[in-house]
């Protein structure tokens, strides 16, 4: 449930699952989004796909994952967010979803 809550701040609605672009200047919102992504991948299928930039983080205890996110610089938070968004759009395109 925590992963869905953090992920949902970047989703237009639960029915469509369409992602909206978050404000890249709102570092705290992006960091909250990252906390959710450290729990599990929100897309259907494997909750920790091996190709994900967060794969190794998700192998750590949850408290350690959150400590790592807390230690990210603002630039790292934005970088991780953009990489996750690129993955999302790539997977939606590949899977034939919009």
Image (cartoon, rainbow, N blue to C red):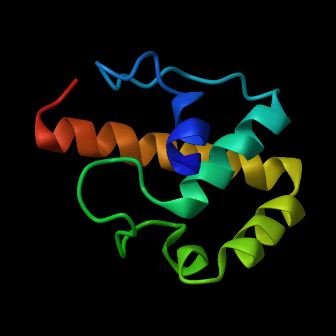
- Can residue 80 be spotted in the picture? no
Residue found 56% across the figure and 22% down from its top: 21
Residue 19 in picture, x, y percent from top left:
43, 25
Q: In the image, is 60 to the left or to the right of 98?
A: right
Task: Find residue 49 and report its image quarter.
Answer: bottom left
What residue sits 88% from the left and 56% below the top?
A: 73
Q: Position of residue 70 (x, y in %)?
A: 86, 60
List the single residue furthest toward the left: 96
Numbered disc total:
0
- For the C terminus, the quadrant is top left
x, y percentage for residue 68? Answer: 79, 70
Residue drawn at 33 percent across, 47 percent down:
43
Q: Is residue 75 left or right of residue 3?
A: right
When the figure is inspected, residue 29 is found, relative to residue 87, above or below; the finding is: above
Image vertical order of residue 20 relative to residue 36, above or below: above
- In the rendered structure, the answer to whether residue 10 lies left or right of residue 89 reads right
Q: Quadrant of residue 37?
A: bottom right
Residue at (54% x, 67% y) in the render: 54
Residue 58, can we see it?
yes
Name the outermost residue toward the front.
Answer: 1
Residue 81 vertical placement versus 51 (above, below):
above
Q: Position of residue 94 (x, y in %)?
A: 16, 44
């Amino acid at each position: 449930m925590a992963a869905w809550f953090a992920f949902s701040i970047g989703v237009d609605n639960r029915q469509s699952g369409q992602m909206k672009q978050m404000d890249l200047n709102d570092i705290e919102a992006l960091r909250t989004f990252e906390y959710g992504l450290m729990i599990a991948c929100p897309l259907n299928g494997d909750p920790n796909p091996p190709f994900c930039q967060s794969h190794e983080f998700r192998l750590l205890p949850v408290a350690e994952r959150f400590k790592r996110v807390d230690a990210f610089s603002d630039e790292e938070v934005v970088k991780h967010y953009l990489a996750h968004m690129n993955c999302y759009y790539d997977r939606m395109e590949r899977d034939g979803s919009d």
